[in-house]
Amino acid sequence: MRDEPTLTATSAATSAPTTPDSTSPRPSRLLLVASTGGHLTQLVAMRGWWEQFDRAWVTFDNPHASSALVGEDVIHAHSPTTRNIPNALRNLRLARRVLSEHGPDLVISTGAGVAAPFFAVAHLRGIRTMYIEVIDRITTRTLTGRMVYPFVDRFAVQWPEQQRLYPGAAVIGPTI
């Protein structure tokens, strides 16, 4: 079994997320994958954790991503992704190319649909994955969370109440 990535998040207003377990291998290269909107906002809010690593981002080409990721290495995914089979296949092809070219040690995402193809390819290639369930889904599971939960290396939730939805998930606290 591969070592699980670890991460603890704290509110962006108070302090930055940290990696608490010094025995867990630290990634040297990250691939951060998120749809724009709240998903991307939650990953960007974790800057205190990810800024120390070499990284690339996968998100959509729109004004939110452009302004939030100034100066970052950004790969644009195909959207929309919700129940759009042609774009899911395009993003699967993109995932194969990006994972080969960038060689990340860890793929991390807060969703949404764009994450699934990247997690599937990463899993097949033995690249560690970590999914962070979004902050606003406390009583129900997201579609992406349900899709990736069975095979991610580490599944994280932001509220203790979410653990009943995802047994074995790590509570990292709110990202924003």
Image: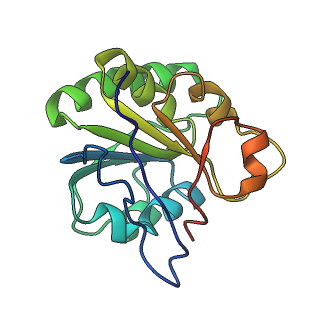
The front one of 16 and 76 is 16
Q: Horizontal and vertical percent for residue 10?
A: 53, 71
Residue at 41% from the left image edge and 61% from the top image edge: 65
Residue at the farthest front position:
23
Residue that sits furthest to the top in the current view: 124
Where on the picture, by quarter, is residue 143?
top right
Q: Residue at x 60, y 29 (%)?
A: 149
- Residue 63 visible? The answer is no
Please say if 93 is above or below 142.
Answer: above
According to the image, what is the colour scheme of the structure?
rainbow
Q: Position of residue 11 (x, y in %)?
A: 55, 75
Q: Is residue 130 among the parts visible in the rendering?
A: yes
**121 and 158: which is toward the camera:** 158
- Horizontal relation, residue 132 to residue 56: left or right: right
Q: Position of residue 156 (x, y in %)?
A: 57, 46
Q: Is residue 31 above or below residue 124?
A: below
**Quadrant (top left/top right/bottom left/bottom right) for the C terminus:** bottom right
Image x and y of residue 142, in percent: 71, 39
Location of residue 164 by image quarter: top right
The N terminus, quarter of image:
top left
Q: Is residue 79 left or right of residue 122?
A: right
Residue positioned 51% across, 20% down in the render = 86
